[in-house]
Image (cartoon, rainbow, N blue to C red):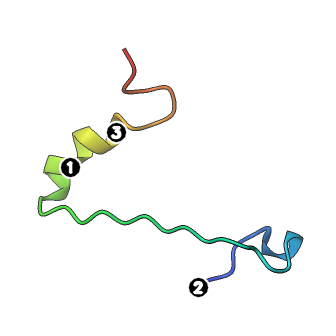
Amino acid sequence: MQPIPGDHLKERPFWHVDHKTLLNASAADIWPWLVQMGNGRAFA
């Protein structure tokens, strides 16, 4: 696991979470879906 800024603030974290999604599609197909997931988006 790569260190990230702020790791020094908690010596021994008690949990770790990773999320991964594999999509069998081109970047051009996924981009419109991905863009709508930004902050304050995808909510009507």
Earlier-in-chain disc, 1 versus 2: 2
Q: Which residue is mark 3?
A: 35
Distance Cα–Cα, label 2 vs label 3: 28 Å
- For this orientation, the residue located farthest to the bottom is 1
- Image spot of residue 6 (x, y percent): 80, 68
User: Measuring 75% from the left and 69% from the top, which residue is drawn there?
Assistant: 5
The quarter of the picture where the C terminus appears is: top left
Look at label 1 and name its amino acid: Ile
Secondary element at tag 3: helix
- Pick whichever, 3 or 15, lies toward us: 15
Q: Which residue is mark 2?
A: 1
Left or right relative to 23: residue 42: right
Tell me whether circle 2 and circle 3 mark residues in contact (CB < 8 Å). no
- Image spot of residue 23 (x, y percent): 19, 61
Distance Cα–Cα, label 1 vs label 2: 27 Å
Q: Residues within 10 Å of mark 2 (few under 14, many from 20)?
A: few
Earlier-in-chain disc, 3 versus 1: 1
Q: Which label number is shown at residue 30?
A: 1
- Image spot of residue 18 (x, y percent): 49, 68
Residue 9 figure quarter: bottom right
Look at label 2 and name its amino acid: Met
Left or right relative to 19: residue 14: right
